Image: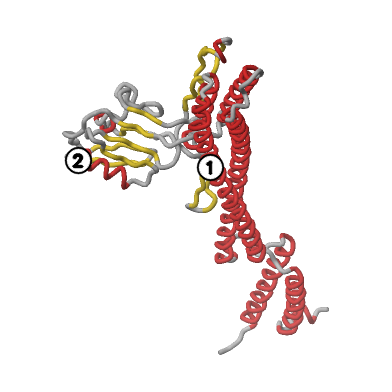
Amino acid sequence: MRITNMMQNNTLVRTLNRHQLALDETQNQLGTGQRIKTPSDDPGRATNQMFFRSRINELETFQSNIDDGFGRLQQIDGELDRIGNLFQRARVLAVQASNGIYQGDKGFELEVAVGKEIDELLRALVDIANTRDATGRPLFGGHVIERPPFEPIESKIKGLQGLELKNQYIGVEYRGDIGEQIREIEKGEYIPVTVPGNKVFWGTNMSVTSRVDNSGYVAVSDQKFKIDGAEILVSAGDTIDDIIDKINNAPIEVKANKLAQDNISLSSTAPHQIWLEDTEGGTVLRDIGLIDPANSEPPNNYSKSATVTGLSVFDVLIQFRNDLIQKDQERISGRDIQDLDLALENVLRYRAITGARMNRLEEHSQRVEFDKSYMTELLAKNEGIDFPETIMNLKWLETIHQYALNVGSKIIKPTLMDFLR
């Protein structure tokens, strides 16, 4: 094969162009500190960079959710601590009253003072229950944010020995829902960062007992209803026994029983206000006498004929105050102290749950920080350059380029112009 001058020239030019391109890329890397200028430079590395950056952004979002959730739980923990102290004080007063400390020459004055203190504790408890977070949302209202979750009912009642008439709380109704605000702390991993008021502000177990004879009840169609948010499916032809079985098999802290008159009774297995609702046009709970046909939306939608038992934490304090007004030392030493203990136990239960969630968030925060640091390191290695190595490559390329120029000047044969010098 004959090697022509043109072939030698073309080879030399291609070689020099490759050197200049490599020099340009290396100089650009030194100028920007990055390996890749465009994805086409290295598709593999470019894909990894996109993944690392996306993951880092995800982790930053998760960390923000963790910080927000931890702040909410921390505030809830503080409020539950206040409630615990409040009930500790109420219990001390109840024990003193049960021991007859407020009897004697100055008993009346002491009873008046204690009655006023209990009333102030009750008002303070309502204030705590309606606490809002930094964004203005109620802490204990579930998903309801447009109104305070707890509404006190005031009325004039006779004070001690009938000598005082004033407005006092005779009840407190929950106006929130059973929803929990949640935060995503990892892909597909969520954690509740609030506690609905129907749970944490309930003092004793609750029961709702229908007065309707359901011996002949048969569901006329497929229907649905919910208890504490858990959906229960009723098939056409189901009897009251079938419905009771389905309730008892549901993952809820409520059990159902059929009583002697074939009426159904629901009882909570842990203190909370039972949440009942017919859904999607169903009428099962109305038909069996548990909720009011004229007021089917929870809360406080129980049938007027049903027997409802159970006390909220507000009811516990109201009961104690009223027994104190009535000078009923037996009830104070019996049911009042017992109910105060149950209410305090439930508050401590949810404080423990809150603390466990805070611990989980703290541990997860450390994991997110580690993952973020690791991903950032991988990203730096993937897109960044090793400056000493790159400088050495640049010097090496410059040297090779100079050698190529020198060799090329010798390879190219002299032309007529060279002889005219």
Q: What number is the disc on residue 238?
A: 2
Q: Position of residue 353 (x, y in %)?
A: 54, 46
Report how many numbered discs are placed on residues in the image. 2
Q: Position of residue 411 (x, y in %)?
A: 71, 84
Q: What number is the disc on residue 248?
A: none
On the rendered structure, is 343 left or right of 276? right
Seen in the picture, residue 16 relative to 199 is either above or below; the reply is: below
Visible in this render: residue 8?
yes
Q: Position of residue 114 (x, y in %)?
A: 62, 23
Seen in the picture, residue 26 relative to 83 is either above or below; the reply is: below
Dot 2: few (<14), some (14–19), or many (≥20) neighbours within 10 Å?
some
Asked which quadrant contains residue 164, the reply is: top right
| Residue at the spot of label 1 | 350
The earlier-in-sequence mark between 2 and 1 is 2
Which quadrant holds the N terminus? bottom right
Q: Nearer the viewer, residue 237 or 136?
A: 237
Q: Residue at x 55, y 59 (%)?
A: 51
Q: Position of residue 268 (x, y in %)?
A: 39, 39
The scheme the figure's colours follow is: secondary structure
